[in-house]
Amino acid sequence: MNPFLVLAVVLLLVLYIFRVATTRPPNFPPGPPSLPIYGAYWLLLLNNWTYIHKAIEKMRCRYRSNLLGFYLGGVPTVVACDYETIKEIETRPEFLGRMDTIIARERGLGKLLGVILADGPLWAHQRRYMLRHMRDFGFGTRSASLENLVQQEIQDMVDILNGKKQDKGIYRDGLALLPDLFFHILLNAIWSMYAGDRFSYTDHGHARFIAQQGIKFVRANDPTGRALALTPWIRHIFPQKSGFTQIRNTNTKLVEVIKKTIDEHIRTHSEDHMRDFIDIYIKEMKTNENNPNGSPFSEEQLIFLGWDLLVSTATTLTTTLSMYIMYMMHHPEVQSNIQNEIDTVVGHNRLPTLNDRSKMPYMEASLRELMRISSIFSLGIAHRATEDTHLRGYFIPKNTMLLTGLHSYHNDPEVWGDPHIYRPERFLDEKGQLLKKDLTLPFGAGKRLCAGETFGRQNMWLILTGLLQNFTLAVPKGQKPPDLHTVNGFHQTSPEVWFQPLPRT
């Protein structure tokens, strides 16, 4: 081979890599250089192959900046790691976009549907509509009927753990399984409002099946979209390893469950009796079907509104509850303080209710501290800049991906002092009362604030107080406390962990 030709090829390759590494938008935030194909993603993986948010934290320290800028593939990307900048991203209208990826399209059967992964006028309309009408059934507000339903589910869980009922899928040989223990309670709560129905008391297996599909979908991805989103063609070469097969298969099963329920509602629909959100939405579909300007209401959109409600409930809330129990096993002194508070305020003759919540500041502080230290949405859900703009003095080009580094912020020593210590007292004043201002952001903020924040906070509180009222959450005999780690994905999820619920006398 001609040595001059080889030299020329090598020089061209070096020039190409140099150009890729140094090409950045003008006045872009500081960050690592790019490499061919995946940009800085290579360097993030090199820093931490499993947890991208930990790699981001290393980059933040290396560049001494709370705002990082780099390329993921060909996409300019910005990560904010402090409270003020995260809030700015969450609240400014030019940052309300979502990324149009192969994963979002595959989930929506070729379209950007639902509310979590969609944007634009249709997203804004459908989010307002869903919140307004789900509220009628108890979502996002204080609802006596929903609270009563959840307490029935909690009592069912207590009866299983006390041996009065049997479900070997979640409790056997004196041990209970996380996160499966919570699937039935939370899915029944959300499904009762969306579909007007509950999964069987005698068979929790169907609720667990749905939840497990959601968890598998979440784990096939990560906040950046991984290689699949950055190079969509990889699904044709490595469908299994890229996560594409798992995304498609789990999504198909979830859609089938929801569509079957919607089809049954269409068959039995009566405008004289609105049973649930599906019925209300079907009525809107019929009312708008001849609209000459087109209708925002469709069966496929209804499917993915349900998908968003089901999967977010089955994955985020159950992970938070599971991590809470794992931390209680590591911190029996915190558990004892909570039980003393429950005994004083509630006693043992009834389950705790939301009326008790304001009288139990330590319990509330322990849950806030858990959401801070675990940071389930470690990098939030990716936003997209819908126009050229500026952030903290830096230029942000249109279609930049913006990530909110909640893990970095929630674990910043300059903000929290001892962020790696689980300490509920940080949310209490000198009198033991709950601080009025909560500086954590587990549910986001602004118009992209998680629609289920109130639903989540209320029901996690009810479930945990009901559990701690009746049981001490212990490490199984002969075992060590579980590692306090999560499984990486679109957001963090809980590993399977067995714990021992010891009945309290």
Image: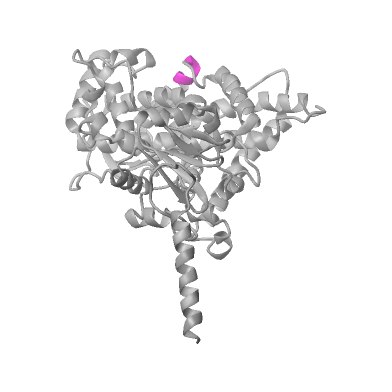
Find residue 129 and report its image quarter: top right
Left or right of 251? Residue 418 is left
Q: Position of residue 285 (x, y in %)?
A: 73, 28
Note whether residue 263 is visible: no
The residue at the far bottom in this view is 1
In this rendered view, identify the residue nearer to me: 373 or 70.
70
Q: With respect to residue 18, does 411 lie above or below?
A: above
Prevailing secondary structure of the magenta residues:
helix
Q: Nearer the viewer, residue 46 or 470?
A: 46
Q: Position of residue 283 (x, y in %)?
A: 72, 24
Which color mode does the image show?
one colour
Q: Is residue 146 magenta?
A: yes
Residue range in magenta is 143-148
In this view, the residue in front, 185 or 337, is 337
Q: Would residue 5 be visible to someone looking at this image? A: yes
Relative height, residue 133 to residue 64 (above, below): above
Q: Judge from the rendering whether residue 6 lies leftward or rightward of residue 232; answer left or right.
A: left
x, y percentage for residue 51?
36, 49
Tell me how many marks there are. 0
Residue 449 in magenta stretch: no
Residue drawn at the location 79% of the way across and 28% of the way down: 293
Q: Which corner quadrant holds the C terminus?
A: top left
Give percent across and percent down for residue 428. Answer: 24, 19
Q: Residue at x 67, y 26 (%)?
A: 281
- Image-based side of 110 in relation to 441, left or right: right
